Amino acid sequence: MSKILSDVAPEVLARFAADMVAWQTRHGRHGLPWQNTRDPYRVWLSEIMLQQTQVSTVLDYFPRFLKQFPDVAALAGASQDEVLGLWSGLGYYSRARNLHRCAIEVMARFGGVFPQDPVDLQSLPGIGRSTAAAIAAFCFGKRAAILDGNVKRVLTRVLGYGADLSMVAHERVLWNLADELLPTQALSTAMPRYTQALMDLGATVCLPRKTDCAMCPVQALCVAKQEGEQLRYPVKTRKLKRSSEALWMLWAQNKRGDVWLEKRPAQGVWASLYCLPVFASAEALVGTLPFGQELRHDAAFVHVLTHKDLHLHPVRAHHERTLSKPLRVGVEGAWMARAQWQSLGLPAPVRKLLEG
């Protein structure tokens, strides 16, 4: 047992998992559409959608996704464009691309049945250690620890673990601590409850900027509460380096009102999404136009990504003729009516422009 856990009163430590399970039964969340199921497809889908996305947003997307792709076979049989189109608006589109790839691999490697072993689950695209543990715990009662952002916050506060989590070695120690705190009995029922308890506590009680310690089932164990330093944890000193980039977007429409959209490369920003043509400068944009016309420069705006600020400059070009030939040769693109582009996967700022 680690030194941190050895410093905790044994009788309290022995109650940790049991108290969490009991609290979740009485006070946790129970009505979310991906709960109360052992279906790994639904659990996996919800776990991927909930990464860096609020529950309120996922509540809108989850049923629509299930309606179109009710099982892993249906998702694997879809095209990537269909998946990205349905995902449009959720952001972090690499999740959708990995979701599709994962479904295909589940069909090819595991005969359409999600594996029970967390190691096998983690070998699938887009499934990391924590997501694999969540699927294994919820669906198969496996003794596997999750460690997403909410859980890191809960455990570092409870254990008083002040090591810098920006260092891999320190995070590895926290993984080991999380493993040691897992239930040891009646795993089939205890593991789903315990895992959900950690999620619920981090989402509703042990919040980043405030805590409701009176509602916490393990407040007697919590070192941070005893110290009066709840908000000091978790410690992560390394900050993400932000960058910025200016891009010019050609918003070309023909007489019918069709918009020219191009499919982005498989790598880089907005990978594999349909988008207005993007250029590094206004001069590059003008130089690519195959016909003379008056251009209108709309107000520039900033779109914030995780690590980068995009300064976007929309440039409108209206052509009086009804065009059917490509606007640009050598790129994958097409003139699209509103009914066509509305169902595609589009970057959020492009969709906002077109619908504005």
Image (tube, helix red, strand yellow):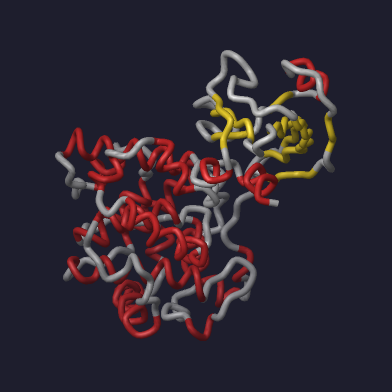
| Front residue of this view, candidates 261 and 212 | 261
Identify the residue at horizontal 45%, vertical 72% (top origin): 201
Q: Where residue 313 sits: x, y (%)?
A: 79, 36
Q: Where residue 270 sits: x, y (%)?
A: 57, 35
Q: Is residue 229 above or below residue 132?
A: below
Quadrant housing the N terminus: bottom left
Q: Is residue 99 visible?
A: yes
Q: In the displayed structure, does residue 250 sit left or right of residue 138?
A: right
| Front residue of this view, candidates 3 and 207 | 207
Q: Where residue 95 sits: x, y (%)?
A: 45, 43
Identify the residue at horizontal 62%, vertical 73% (top origin): 210
Q: Where residue 230 sits: x, y (%)?
A: 60, 71
Q: In the displayed structure, does residue 286 sit left or right of residue 77?
A: right
Quadrant housing residue 235: bottom right
| Front residue of this view, candidates 224 and 84 | 84
Identify the residue at horizontal 77%, vertical 36% (top origin): 314
Identify the residue at horizontal 19%, vertical 66% (top origin): 187
